[in-house]
Amino acid sequence: MKEMPDSPPVKPRTQQPEHPEFWDKRFSEGTTPWNAGGVPSALRSFVQAESTQAPGLANRRMLVPGCGHAWEAAWLAEQGMNVTALDFSATAVAEAARTLGTWSGTLLQADFFSFPPTAPFDLVYERAFLCALPRRIWPDYGARMYQLMAPRGRLIGFFFFSDEPKGPPFGIQPEVLDALLAPWFKREADLPVTDSIPVFSGKERWQVWRRRD
Ligand SMILES: C[S@@+](CC[C@H](N)C(=O)[O-])C[C@H]1O[C@@H](n2cnc3c(N)ncnc32)[C@H](O)[C@@H]1O
């Protein structure tokens, strides 16, 4: 009788970044090299520019998916935005709750791809979220962002460019990012970043993408 080849061993969920257990482990061990511990200057500049324009920031609905420690969510809420911070890792949500304290926004433990929003978002902030997702999940990212956003809504934030095959962080190529987002969004800004933390240094750019209607 012919012997069947061994099937590859199944990795535990703590080694698969599409599962919350992967992130739970890293947050509980304090292995979080992506943690900026503050608000990046490109986000501050964007919000400053927006707040000088009518109708300003008040009550704009903003989503922060994969919020991690939620430094930006806390600050955005302080600027007057209606912020929803979301993460599927219970340990990340516990860290976020510590950062946020008593705040005006909503903190959810939920999966970005399946949570039911109460209303469309005007803005979604990306930082170290797309690059946390295994590449085979990427095709769902653009469609889901489009689905979550109001007409003319914007996806703003940092995109990590690298051809290193292993991750996370899973780097993207510019043309792959364009192919992912261009069917749903039109890019309005693309700028270098000057205050990256070491893990992203020289490899991230600030971009703004507007939803096509
Ligand atoms: C690399 S960390 C970045 C955290 C934060 N954005 C930051 O910049 O510090 C990626 C985060 O995305 C979360 N995450 C990954 N996949 C997710 C999903 N499908 N839904 C919600 N959160 C997810 C992880 O739990 C983790 O907290």
Image (tube, helix red, strand yellow):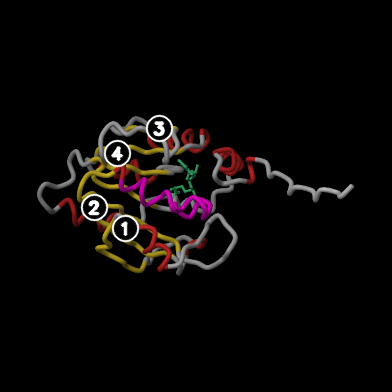
Give yes or no for residue 132 being in the magenta stretch: yes
> Disc 4 or 3, which lies upstream in sequence?
4
> Disc 4 or 1, which lies upstream in sequence?
4
Q: Which residue is mark 1?
A: 183
Q: Nearer the viewer, mark 1 or mark 3?
A: 1
Q: Which residue is mark 3?
A: 108
Q: Picture coordinates of residue 85 (x, y %)?
A: 37, 38
Q: CA distance from mark 4 to mark 3?
A: 11 Å
| Residue at 23% over, 49% down | 153
Drawn side of residue 162 relative to residue 25, left or right: left
Using the image, determine if residue 118 lies above or below residue 208: above
> Disc 1 or 2, which lies upstream in sequence?
2
The region drawn magenta spans 130-146
Q: Which residue is mark 4?
A: 83
Tell me if label 4 and label 1 are in contact, CB under 8 Å: no
Q: Amino acid at mark 3?
A: Leu
Q: Amino acid at mark 2?
A: Val
Ligand 1 under 8 Å from disc 4 Cβ: no
Which secondary structure is most common in the magenta stretch? Answer: helix
Drawn side of residue 148 relative to residue 130, left or right: left
Residue ranking furthest to the front: 1
Q: Which residue is mark 2?
A: 47
Q: Picture coordinates of residue 4 (x, y %)?
A: 81, 48
